[in-house]
Amino acid sequence: LDKLILSWLLPLEQLGVYAIAATAAFGSLRLISPIFNAVLPRLVQLRNKEKKLIAFNKKFALTISILVFGSAIAYSTFGYEILEIWLHDTSVVKAVYPLLSFLLVGSAMNAFYGIGYQNWLAKGKVKKVLIVNMIALFISLPAMIVLISKYGLIGATFGWIFLNFIGLIMSLSWIKLSIIKRGF
């Protein structure tokens, strides 16, 4: 939706800059998707074994944390240079870098949101996935229109951040279970 709204509200060349940043940010999630695919069968096995599920979720969260924070350090250290190598155009890099930085915040939240999401799937709580997506859609759609109109491309990044923030907050039930049962 962000790209659709952008195409209506901003010049087409700005959509291209945003699309480059979005492609890189969303592509970063592809780096962790094999982990989510690998853990889902184990989460299904443990869905009714709360103590083991809590222990497994702690390891899962630690793995995601290491990947997210390691990637954040790598991006903050080498991100601009990597973009220069990839894009070969300093003016495009200057336009893409701040957008990508914001979009990567949303992708980081998406990675942590994925822990709760995988637990929902393992427990067959697919209705929660629908609810989160509907809430995010109905809140972020009007917010994106306002933010893009007011802040341009940076405003568009907040749609992705907000969407993932909502998902993250709503998916934290696995942490609540850990705190209630044993302490985190």
Image: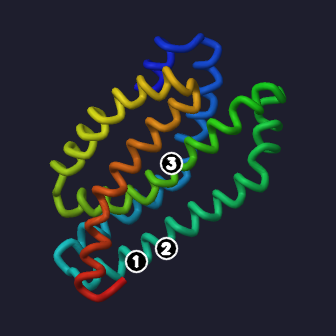
Q: Which residue is mark 3?
A: 107
Which residue appears at 41% of the width and 23% of the height? 145
Type of amino acid at the residue the image marks with label 2: Leu
On the image, the x and y values in percent for residue 83 come to 76, 38
Q: Residue placed at 72% from the left, 57% from the top?
A: 74
Residue 154 percent location from the top left of the image: 58, 32
Q: Quadrant of residue 70?
A: bottom right
Residue drawn where x is 50% and y is 65% of the image = 64
Ranked by sequence position, the earlier of labels 3 and 1 is 1
Amino acid type indicated by mark 3: Ser
Q: Which mark is residue 62?
A: 2
Question: Which mark is on residue 78?
Answer: none
Within 10 Å of disc 1 (Cα), the crowding (few <14, some 14-19, many 20+) is some
Q: Is residue 46 above or below residue 165?
A: below
* CB under 8 Å between discs 3 and 2: no
Considering depth in this image, is 153 or 62 the residue closer to the camera? 153
Residue highlighted by disc 1: 58
Front in this rendered view, residue 148 or 64 = 148
Q: Is residue 18 left or right of residue 181?
A: right
Going by the picture, which residue comes out furthest to the bottom? Answer: 182
Q: Secondary structure at mark 1?
A: helix
Mark 3 and mark 1: Cα distance apart in space: 20 Å
